Amino acid sequence: MDPVIFVGSANLTLAAAVAERMGLTLGSRALTRFPDSELHVEVQESVRGRDVYVIQPTSPPVHEHLFDLLMLVDACRRAGAARLTGVIPYFGYARQDRRANGRDPVGARLVADLVGTSGVDRVVALDLHSAALEGFFPFPLEHLSAIPILAQAAASAVSAESVIVAPDLGAVKLAERYARMLHMPIAVVNKTRLSGEEVEAKGIVGDVHARPILIVDDMITTGGTIAAAVKVVKAAGATSEVTVAATHGLFVGPAQERLRVLGVKRFIVTDSVALAADLRLPVKVVSVAPLLAEAIRRLNGDQSLNDLIAHV
């Protein structure tokens, strides 16, 4: 039996592309708000005994999109769905995976618990900020990767002289995966985070002099990390041919103003989150709809996802 695919309010375009790829139409549902801002969800078709997939990145506004997901899953569970999978292309709170000072919460674990409580049997995620997040879920998590898609898109923007740059130590493994696919050397920026929006880059390990640059990261939020990396590689003598590739292009807060003045030739991101309509940056978007559609098709047929999983 064909699966049923529902979508919250976060990325209707992506969900519609996934459904179209599978020859399906999106499940009918209504999301409305009461005058006091409470969310009301109604599933408008039968899901009893069906394999249900709810596609909903928990992108900004994170709390609204997270609650869309929780309410849709709960509605489907109470309506008799046989199996429920939360397809979360972007997982909000992923960076809060440990306590920084001993008196703050582990937000990623809390969100994982909430998703589990809603009734999800399985989660499909895409390029999580940390692979260790899998341990936060008491049920299976399928960690897919868009890196092969992004590397393929970046291949036409780089040359044999290009260098892949990890903007901090946390992105080294990510850079190594790109390097294996594109057969390019790696350089690493020495970065210190000063706050949620501000970072300081103190230098770079590796030779970037007179070479084009491909900076890779899992996400672009306020652009602080990318901006610091671009300034460091240019100070080290890199050419003006700078490309940035990241799975999740949030571009929130001061990101546009911060990044627009850097002279980056192109930003390559996926459609894991819906991009702002007023985004004024040279952005190339590659779709993860084929990847998600294939994952759903295989899960519905109880087939292996091994070649789609992010092996880190």
Image: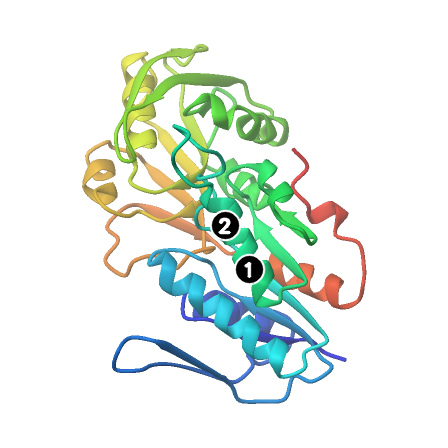
Amino acid marked by disc 1: Val
Left/right of residue 176 with respect to residue 243 in the rendered view: right
Q: Quadrant of residue 103?
A: top left
Q: Position of residue 95 (x, y in %)?
A: 44, 39
Which corner quadrant holds the C terminus? top right
In the rendered view, how is the structure colored?
rainbow
On the image, numbered disc 1 is attached to which residue?
115
Q: Position of residue 179 (x, y in %)?
A: 58, 26
* Count of residue discs: 2
Q: Position of residue 141 (x, y in %)?
A: 66, 51
Mark 1, Cα crowd under 10 Å, few <14 / some 14-19 / many 20+, is many
Left/right of residue 233 with respect to residue 263 in the rendered view: right
Q: Is residue 68 above or below residue 61?
A: below
Identified at 71% across, 66% down, the residue is 297
Q: Are marks 2 and 1 in contact (CB under 8 Å)?
A: no
Q: Is residue 19 above or below residue 62?
A: below
Identified at 32% across, 36% down, the residue is 265
On the image, numbered disc 2 is attached to which residue?
110
Residue that protrudes farthest toward the front in the picture = 103
Amino acid marked by disc 2: Leu
Q: Position of residue 38 (x, y in %)?
A: 34, 76
Give SS at disc 1: helix
- For the residues labelled 2 and 1, the Cα–Cα distance comes to 9 Å
Front tag of 2 and 1:
2
Q: Quadrant of residue 190?
A: top left
Mark 2, Cα crowd under 10 Å, few <14 / some 14-19 / many 20+, is some
